[in-house]
Amino acid sequence: MTDAPTASGLLLVDKPTGPTSMDVCARVRWRLRQGGAPKRIKVGHGGTLDPMATGLLVLMVGKATKLCETVMAGEKEYEATIDLSRRSTTDDAEGELTFVDVASPPTRAMVSLALANFVGTILQVPPNFSALHIGGERAYDLAREGKPVQLAARPVTVHAIDLLHYEWPLATVRIACGKGTYIRSIARDLGTALSTGGMLTALRRTQVGRWHVRDAALMDSLPAVMTQADLLPLLGES
């Protein structure tokens, strides 16, 4: 009697606020093991979401983990809420917050004009609290220890930014962008351009390449025991 083949395929998950992207992978791995998968079955994701963020995670199981670069290369879409009255050490609500005194809040037209300058291929400095490496250490580890963090600007591509709603101090935007774009950096730099604060208070990823969050399963709705039948086929398979 031969062993059943190791499960492989894709899984779309709507990540809630709180867990890290790797936490979600671990929870799915545990469920697959309950369904008979080997203890070391591989589960990866196509693009990290911060703990505060919600939305689409494309998980890859088994041999599908080889598709990581293909999944991550797809265009991503986010909806974000930016607070222009505060700044943060992490550029989001997780850090130490500072209120910024703004004598004359920008108008909607001013915010729209400033956002337009972030569309195209731009040079972006990642947040100090990011997973990028500096001399073999994670930037966020250095930042937490109070050590200096100097990250170089790098080119990223922003395909479109739409201002969905604006009522001082909050601006809600939809952003379509390429791999490696930090939405926290856009929030921070928008504030700099407007001479205001600038930090994220909410972030939701709605799309990664061909996949949309409307087709994703909530974490709480995933079965306790998962098998091959719970996974989407690999790219190019039917």
Image (cartoon, helix red, strand yellow):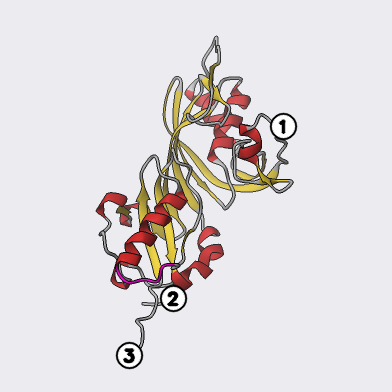
Secondary element under disc 3, as helix, strand or loop, is loop
- Would you say 226 lies left or right of 189 here? left
| Location of mark 3 (residue) | 1
Which residue is at 44% across, 38% downward? 52
Amino acid beneath label 3:
Met
Secondary element under disc 1, as helix, strand or loop, is loop
Q: Percent position (x, y) of residue 105? A: 51, 15
The residues bearing labels 2 and 3 have C-alpha atoms spaced at a distance of 30 Å
The residues bearing labels 1 and 2 have C-alpha atoms spaced at a distance of 46 Å
Residue closer to the observer: 100 or 218 = 218
Q: Percent position (x, y) of residue 182? A: 57, 42
Which residue is at 58% across, 30% downward? 188
Q: Percent position (x, y) of residue 12? A: 37, 58
Which corner quadrant holds the N terminus? bottom left
Which residue is at 45% across, 28% downward? 171
Highlighted magenta segment, given as a residue range: 35-39
Residue closer to the observer: 117 or 21 = 21
| Location of mark 1 (residue) | 148
Residue closer to the observer: 48 or 189 = 48
Q: Estimate how packed mark 1 is, as few (under 14), some (14 to 19) or many (20 or more) residues with alpha carbons within 10 Å.
A: few
Mark identifier at residue 236: 2
Q: Is residue 126 visible?
A: no
- Mark 2 or mark 3, which is nearer to you? 3
Amino acid beneath label 1:
Pro
Amino acid beneath label 2:
Gly
